[in-house]
Each structure stands twice: as structure tokens, then as C-alpha cells.
Amino acid sequence: MRGMGRNRVHYVALALLACAATAPARAQEAIYGDFGVTLGQGFDQSLSLGRALLYGNVEAERFQPSYPLYLFREYYAVITPRTRLVAGIMAESVPFASIDECMTHLNAVQSYIGRFGVPRMTAQSDREVLVQVEQGNRAAYLRCNRGQNVRMELNYVDYTLLRQRDQEAGR
């Protein structure tokens, strides 16, 4: 049964890539962020619902956007400690019953990051599937991950600001 799940993920991933390859070309937007939070800008502290500790001991500010996406329930902004600039934004989905169910939803919302360019698969296993678009020092990606629960993440990152965050934190 376990091998069948891996094959299903493989076939779904191939379908995802085929859809991206046949999508009509359109002007791409710059990766700026989402949910009322912009990469590289100061974080509006009035949006904060408190701090959270994300995977990898990354501190983030929880916030609730004015217009949340239908599958996503938790929203976080990763902030540089001193300058308070937004280095990353993450939306976390509701839990799914299986990685296959998560992949089905990932396929449905991949066009959301497709506005930044053609999404490409950068990781695929029976524990994780990662599809991303990169633009210089920024990236937008969708990830299905099997941790304690199966969830999908929508992430926006500015790698330069993530390095700055580490420097400001003294790491």
C-alpha cells in the first residue's frame, strides 16, 4: 500500500508539471508578498495576534488578513528583529487526511503562484512535495508536507532579508 501512495504522488506531480508546461504565457508579477503584508516593508504591528514559533525555531508574528484564502487558516510573518522588515510570509492550510488530498488541493491553487512565473517542482517524496517560482532573491512556493499533520503551506520569502534577520539576531 505504501508504494501505491508514492506512485500516486509521482503521477500527480507529473500532472502538475504538465499543466504548468501547457499554461498560456502571460505577464508575470513581481513577488511582493500577500495578505496585506509586503516583503521588504516594515511590519504593521497592529496586525499582530502574537508571536509563534515555526518549524526550525523560527520566530514569527501571527496575523489575520482581511481577505484570507479559502484553504488557509494560519498566517505568519517572519520579521527582522531590529529593523522589523518582513522577510517571509507563510499561510498554513487546514489539515488534510492524506498527502494525496493535499496534492489535489495544491494542484488546484498552484495557479495562485503561477502569476509570478511558471511553477517548477523542486522536491518530491512521500513526505513532501514542493513547487516554487523564483525571482532573483525572492521565491513563492507551495508545499505539501507530512509532519504531525498533512498540511499545505504557501510561502513568500526574500532570501536577502532572511540573511539580514540572522545577522540582526547575532547568528
Image: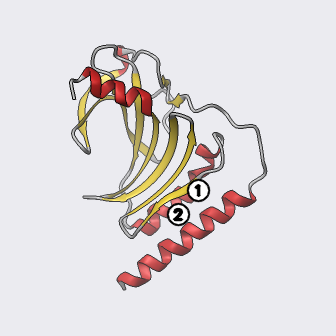
| Closer-to-camera residue (117/148) | 117
**Res. 70 visible in picture:** no
Give me the disc on residue 104. Answer: 2
Label 2 near label 1: C-beta < 8 Å?
A: yes
Residue shown at the point (62%, 68%) measured from the top left: 15
Instruction: Name the disc covering residue 108, or none.
Output: 1
Q: Quadrant of residue 147?
A: bottom left
| The N terminus lies in quadrant | bottom left
Examine the image and state in which quarter residue 157 appears.
Answer: top left
Kind of residue sitting beneath label 1: Ala
Dot 2 falls on a residue whose secondary structure is: helix
Q: Residues within 10 Å of mark 1 (few under 14, many from 20)?
A: few
State the colouring used for the structure image. Answer: secondary structure
Q: Secondary structure at mark 1?
A: helix
* Residue 142 placement, left or right of 21: left
The residue at the point 65 percent across, 49 percent down is 118
Vertical arrangement, residue 92 with respect to residue 13, above or below: above
**What is the three-letter code of the residue carrying label 2?**
Thr
Residue 149, horizontal then vertical, whole percent: 29, 58
Q: Where is residue 69 drawn, in percent x and y? A: 51, 40
Name above or below for residue 33 compared with residue 128. Answer: above
Q: Foreground: 56 or 5?
A: 56
Query: Could you tell me which residue is drawn at 23 percent across and 24 percent down?
Result: 169
Q: Is residue 1 visible?
A: yes
